[in-house]
Image (tube, coloured by chain):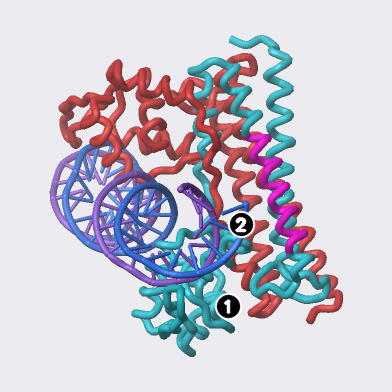
Chain colours: A red, B cyan, C blue, D purple
Amino acid sequence: MSLRYALLGLLRKTSLNGYALKTIFDESIAFVWPAELSQIYRELEGLEKDGFLESSIEMQENRPNKRLYRSTEAGRRHLQEWLEAPPERFSAPKREEFLLRLFFGSATDPEIVKKEFRLVMAQARESLAAIDASTRLAERFPDRPYMVQVDRFCREDRYNRFIRKRGIMAAEMVIAWAEECLAELESQADVR
Amino acid sequence: MSLRYALLGLLRKTSLNGYALKTIFDESIAFVWPAELSQIYRELEGLEKDGFLESSIEMQENRPNKRLYRSTEAGRRHLQEWLEAPPERFSAPKREEFLLRLFFGSATDPEIVKKEFRLVMAQARESLAAIDASTRLAERFPDRPYMVQVDRFCREDRYNRFIRKRGIMAAEMVIAWAEECLAELESQADVR
DNA sequence: TTGCTCATGTAACACGTTACATGATTGT
DNA sequence: ACAATCATGTAACGTGTTACATGAGCAA
């Protein structure tokens, strides 16, 4: 259900077409909720069928026409209800490929496991760099719609800061963990 | 694809029926890779169709018969290949419901957001307790098949320890993060 | 000339969730 | 008496991924 609300959220003040929504996803929400174009198109149709969105065609010369979506009153109400009624439990992502591999890791060469730990660390460092890059981008172009704002005292920015902080802490946790595990594996104490 | 390997992994040395596999999932792998019974049954059929598993019926009196699955040579080879050929990137879970809500949190009452942060903390504490409970269980019944082993020098146990450590660190990270955010929200400095 | 951006979509597939049906046995 | 456990499955649905089709304009 959440993708619906992500779209209603982005469309609560502006009209946008599917393609533009995908761009916005990739530079902002994708960090917490990625979505493919085909999925966005499908969901937009569903939202229109349910009366939460309306669309119209914007003609263009020399490039394809756009189907612009805008929120209806019902759509805004729907979003507001979702925001005001938090669930009893949050759905948290599980299913980490590497941890499953590690679960069966004892059935293979420890050198392979070490290599995988290094890969995990590298990926965490990459995601740190990505967060950093997107923060800089936001500082340079503070006006871009729906990009992370940069204004310390604005509520919107505060929450974005929290989200970025969370990403940083998660990546740092992974790096610390992998380092610790690698250290133990490399000291090779009594492996059977 | 990963569920296939989880099943092949559990069946690499023993024969088990679907129901028993579900029980094992719930007390061990579920932490990193949960699965529903219906999904397990579906996947077992697929694995048999692909020649990685074989099954036979074990008759029972006074209770339903069991369909026992065991790995074929091809199945063991398939698992081994998966273990020995790590992917170029690991698929990491994204899509955190709470973070998406937070992204649009500025459109609602800050008191609701605070309440949600407290819920996030409570859930993280619960998962710490769950990890602790499963560790104690493993210490008391070290012989249960496929439960976390408790033998400091055994490779299997070492990897299980790494996995548990990871769960603990993740939960502690979330608690620290939520505490920090709540502190800032409660000091109420200059909210627009 | 090869490939990217803009733009919309379709189709098939993969994977995960929820609900339902059946039925004996055992524990509270 | 009611619920849980053991046991297998079907069906439908929801959600996410991948591949394909079309076609103009533009930059390396």
In the drawing, what numbered circle is on residue A71?
A: none
Badge 1 and badge 2 in a common chain: yes
**SS category of the residue bearing label 2:** helix
* In this picture, residue A190 sits left or right of residue B20: right
Q: Residue B61 in the image: x percent, y percent?
A: 46, 80
| Foreground residue among D8 and D26 | D8
Q: Tell me the distance, in whole angstroms, between the alpha carbons under discs 1 and 2.
A: 23 Å
How many residues crowd around disc 1 within 10 Å: few (fewer than 14), some, or many (20 or more)? some
* In this picture, residue B18 sits left or right of residue B124: left
The residue drawn where x is 70% and y is 34% is B177
| Residue linked to disc 1 | B84
Q: From the image, which quarter does the N terminus of chain B lie in? A: bottom left
* In this picture, residue A77 sits left or right of residue A114: left
The residue drawn where x is 21% and y is 26% is A55
Q: Residue A118 in the image: x percent, y percent?
A: 68, 63
Image-quadrant location for residue A63: top left
Tally of numbered tags: 2
Image vertical order of residue B146 relative to residue A161, above or below: below
Q: Main secondary structure of the magenta part?
A: helix
| Foreground residue among B29 and A143 | B29
Looking at the rendered structure, the kind of residue marked 1 is: Glu
Q: Residue B43 in the image: x percent, y percent?
A: 40, 69
The residue drawn where x is 61% and y is 34% is A164
Q: From the image, which quarter does the C terminus of chain B lie in? A: top right
Q: Residue A95 in the image: x percent, y percent?
A: 54, 56
Magenta part of the chain: B120-137
Image-quadrant location for residue D15: top left
Q: Is residue B135 magenta?
A: yes
Does the rendering let one see residue A134? yes
The residue drawn where x is 42% and y is 36% is A2
| Residue linked to disc 2 | B31
Subunit under mark 2: B
